[in-house]
């Protein structure tokens, strides 16, 4: 049986959880979290459960298909919980899980930064485009 040195163990651990590496599990989570629809849906659910149509009203511009895919992705990742209430028609609500609430402050900070710096970003883009 081969012996692994402490330095080799550290290197293996470093590579296992380095989100910059495509094979790292954290890389796929970052890919999900960087999706603009994910940010907007999490922000929409910040104040409590909403029906699909209510989320759609808040997250303007998302197609029904995109919104459904985003909600399913968030549910799969444990960030959103979907609950169905027996009624005619059935009532479906979405709400953030504990894991989703933990992400909320980070997502809200990014959203707030984007909203407060959009003019600077537009200015930078205009300068870049005019230099091309």
Image: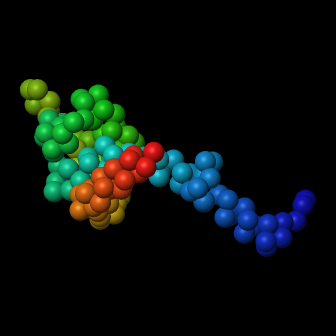
Most distant residue in the left direction: 88
In the image, residue 85 lies at what x, y percent? 16, 37
In the image, residue 27 lies at what x, y percent? 54, 51
Most distant residue in the right direction: 1
> Residue at left 43%, top 49%?
131
Q: Quick one: quadrant of the N terminus?
A: bottom right
Residue 18 falls in image quadrant: bottom right
In the shown orientation, is residue 60 left or right of residue 11?
A: left
> Residue at left 16%, top 57%?
47
In the image, residue 93 lies at what x, y percent? 18, 41
Frontmost residue, 4 versus 57: 57
Tell me, yes or no, if residue 79 can be seen here. Answer: no
Q: Quick one: quadrant of the C terminus?
A: top left
Frontmost residue, 120 versus 82: 120
The tally of labels here is: 0
Most distant residue in the front direction: 131
> Residue at left 72%, top 61%?
12
In the image, residue 121 lies at what x, y percent? 32, 56
Residue 92 falls in image quadrant: top left
Frontmost residue, 80 versus 69: 69
Residue 56 falls in image quadrant: top left
Q: Is residue 6 above or below residue 81?
A: below
In the shown orientation, is residue 27 left or right of residue 117?
A: right
Q: Is residue 132 above or below residue 62?
A: below
In the shown orientation, is residue 15 left or right of residue 48?
A: right
Tell me, yes or no, if residue 50 can be seen here. Answer: yes
Frontmost residue, 9 versus 11: 11
> Residue at left 30%, top 40%?
71
């Amino acid at each position: 049986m081969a012996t692994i040195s402490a330095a080799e163990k550290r290197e293996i651990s470093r590579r296992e959880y380095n989100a910059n590496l495509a094979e790292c599990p954290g890389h796929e989570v970052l890919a999900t979290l960087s999706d603009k629809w994910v940010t907007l849906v999490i922000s929409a659910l910040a104040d409590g459960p909403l029906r699909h149509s209510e989320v759609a009203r808040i997250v303007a511009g998302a197609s029904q298909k995109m919104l459904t895919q985003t909600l399913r992705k968030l549910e799969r990742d444990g960030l959103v919980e979907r609950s169905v209430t027996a009624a005619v028609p059935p009532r479906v609500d979405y709400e953030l899980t504990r894991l989703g609430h933990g992400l909320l402050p980070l997502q809200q900070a990014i959203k707030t930064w984007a909203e407060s710096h959009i003019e600077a970003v537009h200015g930078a883009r205009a300068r870049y485009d005019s230099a091309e």
